[in-house]
Image (spheres, rainbow, N blue to C red):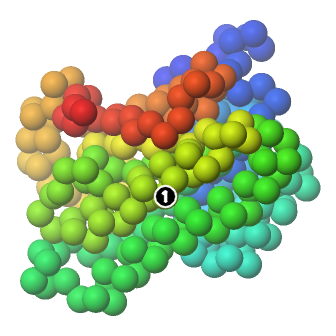
Amino acid sequence: MVSTQSQPSSTASKLMQDRVVLITGASRGIGAATAALLGQHGAAVGVNYYNSETAAQEVVETITASGGRALAVQADVRNVQQVNAMVQQVEEAFGAIDTLVINANAHFPILPFVAYGWEDFEAKLLGELKGAFFPCKAVVPSMIENRRGCIIAVSSGLSRDPGRGFIAHSTAKSGLDAFIKSLALELGSYGIRANVVSPGLTLTEATAQLPQQQKDAAAQSVPLKRNGLPEDVAGAILLLASEQANFITGAYLPVSGGSQML
Ligand SMILES: NC(=O)c1ccc[n+]([C@@H]2O[C@H](COP(=O)([O-])OP(=O)(O)OC[C@H]3O[C@@H](n4cnc5c(N)ncnc54)[C@H](OP(=O)(O)O)[C@@H]3O)[C@@H](O)[C@H]2O)c1
């Protein structure tokens, strides 16, 4: 079950009214929390999943139960045909996508460089960048046509500050950051904004295997003295997606309780 931290009390406070959003990797974790929050703020939401169909349907039910619109759509974001079919499904249901959240998590082994094999390194790089490139290719033409659009990528604090064992993740996410900045530069004149949110350690299934001691130590080292929650990242994505952020593009927004300061 997903929760939200900022539930709108009325139509007037809905920040995403009449918007059509696609969120990759929205069956669990940060993507699911973002889908729920944007849905409660009035967006029609395409909830992408890869394997977790039941979980994606639960996210859809959370949104529709509170009067919103959502659709679960299966696709491997590394597969261009599947991505194109997914975008078509969402657009047939709700109209042109005006907001894309690139969030799907490309799995990777945590290993030191000396133990890293090229195949694992390449799979992470290609997975991360295909998962950004293909969805953007599919939605940007209609954004250009409509002269409005918003792209938000979920990067990681590790894209700027390396962590031991995370060489593939750091390299892939810094590529994602550069990709988004390039889009911000090239697409701004069409009214399309592109930004990055950069979570620190966030409690999801992706971090569930970390020892509790490590999570507690991370919380203690953060100025706000706790681990991040999916809802924290969802709130930052809502902020960047909303019209309140209309003059923000090319930004890198840490969501880490102050563990990363620029
Ligand atoms: N958690 C953290 O501490 C943390 C910190 C910094 C950045 N991030 C970033 O935040 C994002 C979300 O992470 P999370 O912790 O929420 O992950 P998570 O709980 O492990 O969820 C991953 C999501 O990605 C989907 N996914 C995986 N491979 C996919 C594919 N090939 N195609 C489509 N969907 C795919 C999964 O779908 P299925 O379940 O349907 O397969 C699931 O919905 C990631 O980009 C991650 O790098 C996370």
Say which residue appears at 76% left-offset and 38% top-offset.
Answer: 148
The N terminus lies in quadrant: top right
- In this view of the protein, can residue 59 be seen by the observer? no
Position in image of residue 79 (x %, y %): 63, 78
* 116 on left or right of 46: left
Q: Which residue position holds label 1?
A: 179
Say which residue appears at 26% left-offset and 75% top-offset.
Answer: 109
Say which residue appears at 57% left-offset and 75% top-offset.
Answer: 78
- When asked about the image quadrant of residue 43, the answer is top right
Say which residue appears at 76% left-offset and 69% top-offset.
Answer: 84
| In-front residue for pair 113/109 | 113
What amino acid is labelled 1 in the image?
Answer: Phe
Label 1: how many Cα within 10 Å (few below 14, some 14–19, many 20+): some
- When asked about the image quadrant of residue 70, the answer is top right
| In-front residue for pair 256/148 | 148
* 102 on left or right of 121: right
Q: Is residue 27 above or below residue 148?
A: below
Q: Is residue 240 above or below residue 22?
A: above
Position in image of residue 103 (x %, y %): 51, 54
Q: How many marks?
A: 1
The C terminus lies in quadrant: top left
